[in-house]
Amino acid sequence: MSWWTTVLGGAVGFMLGGPLGAMLGVAFAGNFSKRKSNFGGFTGNFNVGDQQRVQAAFFSSLFSVMGYLAKVDGKVSKSEILLAQQVMQQMQLADDMQKAAKELFNQGKREDFNLDEVLEQFRLESHRRTHLIRMFLEIQIQATYADGVLDDKEHDALKYIAQKLHFPIHELENLIQKFSVSSNHASKLTVDDAYVILGAEKSLTDKELKRVYRRLLAQHHPDKLVAKGLPEEMMKIAKEKTQEIISAYELIEKQRGIR
C-alpha cells in the first residue's frame, strides 16, 4: 500500500506525528471528512511501513519549506506560486494531493511556521539519507530561482536549511551553481556548462570523469531514490535530472572524442 493510500485511510498522524504529521493532517482534513474516516484524533492501529513514513515526510516537508522560501524575501511572487504549481504538475498529482500540497505551501508561508522543527523531523525521518536530502535541496533551489534571481536572503535561507539537514555547504553551493548553469543555458549547453553540471574539472582523465558521471547517476537514479523514500510521484523530476547529467556527459564525450 502506498503512503498516499495510507494517508487517505486516515493514518497520517499515526504515520508521522510531530509537526509534519500535524501539518499533513491539516492539509488532508477535508479529505478525511469527505471519506467519513473514523480515525479519531490521529490514533489507531495502522501498519505503516518505513518507506511510507519517509515518503510522507518528504512530501510534507518539500511543499511547506517551499512556501517558507517563497516568502523569505518579504513577498511571494506569482512566479514562485507558479513554480510550486509546476512541481505539482510534474508530479502529476491527483486533485486531492494537489490540494494538500497547496495547503502545505500556504502553511510554510505563515509567520508561526517552525522551520527548525520541520527540518529536524525530516532529517530524522529520512534517516539522514544524503541522496534524498540532496534531491530535496535541488527542488528547493529550483523554487528559489522561480523569479529568475537568487537574492541574498534566499541564499542565506538555503544555507541555513542545508546546515539544519547536516548537508555540506560546499555541496549546496555546487548544486546552486549547477542549477544556475542548466537554467540559463538549457537550450544551448556548452562544454564548460557540462563540466559544471557534472561538478568535474577539465583536468580529469577520461576514466576519472566516467567515475564522476557514474556517481552522479547513482545519486539521481529514480528507482534508487524511490527505494530510499522519494515519493513515487517525484520520479519524473528525478528522471529529468538524470537526463540532464547524461546530456552533459555526452557533450563532453563528443568534445573529447571518447568512444
Image (cartoon, rainbow, N blue to C red):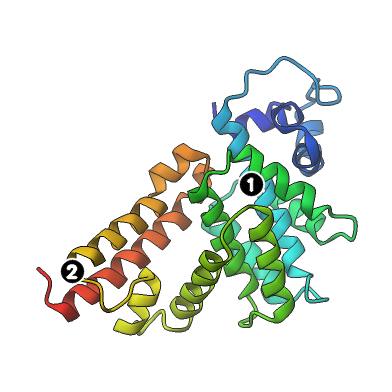
Q: Position of residue 132 (x, y in %)?
A: 52, 48
Residue 4 in view of the camera: no
Q: Position of residue 247 (x, y in %)?
A: 29, 70
Q: Secondary structure at mark 1?
A: helix
Question: Looking at the rendering, which quadrant does residue 211 occupy?
Answer: bottom left
Furthest residue toward right: 112
Q: Secondary structure at mark 2?
A: helix
User: In the figure, is residue 108 to the left or right of 185?
Assistant: right
Please identify, in this view, whether the residue under mark 1 or under mark 2 is nearer the observer. Answer: 2
User: In the figure, is residue 180 to the left or right of 222?
Assistant: right
User: In the figure, is residue 202 to the left or right of 256?
Assistant: right
Q: Position of residue 37 (x, y in %)?
A: 78, 24
Residue 226's disc is none
Residue 206's disc is 2
Q: Residues within 10 Å of mark 2 (few under 14, many from 20)?
A: some
Residue 85 in view of the camera: yes
Pointer 1 residue: 59
Earlier sequence position, callout 1 versus callout 2: 1
Q: Are marks 1 and 2 in contact (CB under 8 Å)?
A: no
Question: Looking at the rendering, which quadrant does residue 188 occupy?
Answer: bottom left
* Amino acid at the residue labelled 1: Phe
User: Residue at position x 80%, y 25% from top?
Assistant: 36
Instruction: Give the CA separation, mark 1 to mark 2.
Output: 38 Å
* Amino acid at the residue labelled 2: Asp
Furthest residue toward left: 259
Question: Looking at the rendering, which quadrant does residue 198 occupy?
Answer: bottom left
